[in-house]
Image: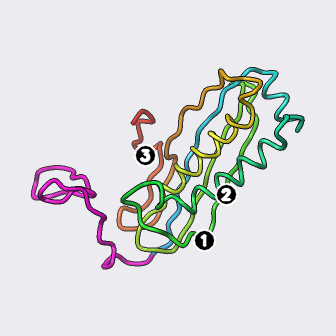
């Protein structure tokens, strides 16, 4: 969002510099989607344990998937200025990646609404990664959660954006 030639502005900061929830009441209802990714790197034997389904706490991937979905639905309770959204879809894909070694987590969120679902996708991805850590920490406390970032968003006034369009991946 830009002001009078002053460049980009933070949308959650008002003219006096105070934090506020953005008024979306005049925005059009559009279909909106966001995709976020993250990774959990671990020892090869930890990945093997998770993939085999023999982790002591149970099915790590299924539990992380459910946790990510639940987190997306509660994003507005965790991030102070997020609007509560009636999500129409949340998908959590968790794939083993032996090149990490570890798991690659992708969260996709969708809504028909007046505001985007980027924070829901990022929250879902983050909590799914945290759940993997929690479920496997007894065998590998050195796991690393990383690379959590937005890959794509579509819908709304700003249209379609992908990481390839100009995302730095480092911010």
SS label for mark 3:
helix
Instruction: Kindly identify which residue carries mark 2.
Output: 91
Residue at 29% from the left image edge and 71% from the top image edge: 23
75 lies above or below 149:
below
Nearer to us in this view, 57 or 100 = 57
Q: Quadrant of the C terminus?
A: top left
Quadrant of the rendered structure where residue 56 is?
A: top right
Nearer to us in this view, 8 or 20 = 20
> Is residue 134 magenta-colored?
no
Q: Do the residues under discs 2 and 1 have CB atoms within 8 angstroms?
A: no
SS label for mark 2:
strand
Range shown magenta: 1-29
- Which mark, residue 14? none
SS label for mark 1:
loop
- Using residue 85 as the reference point, say whether residue 8 is left or right of it: left
- Which mark, residue 165? 3
Q: Main secondary structure of the magenta part?
A: loop
- Which mark, residue 88? 1
């Amino acid at each position: 969002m830009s002001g009078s030639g002053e460049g980009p502005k933070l949308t959650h900061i008002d003219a006096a510099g105070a934090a506020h929830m953005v008024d979306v009441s005049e925005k059009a209802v559009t279909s909106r989607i966001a995709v976020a990714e993250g990774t959990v790197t671990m020892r090869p034997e930890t990945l093997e344990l998770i993939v085999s389904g023999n982790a002591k706490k149970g099915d790590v991937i299924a539990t992380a998937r459910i946790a990510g979905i639940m987190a997306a639905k509660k994003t507005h309770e965790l991030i102070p200025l997020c609007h509560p959204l009636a999500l129409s879809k949340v998908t959590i894909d968790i794939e083993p990646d032996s090149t990490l070694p570890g798991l690659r987590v992708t969260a996709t969120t969708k809504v028909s609404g007046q505001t985007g679902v980027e924070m829901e996708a990022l929250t879902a991805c983050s909590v799914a990664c945290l759940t993997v850590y929690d479920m496997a920490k007894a065998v590998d406390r050195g796991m690393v959660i990383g690379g959590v970032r937005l890959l794509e968003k579509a819908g709304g006034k700003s249209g379609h954006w992908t990481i390839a369009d100009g995302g730095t991946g480092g911010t």
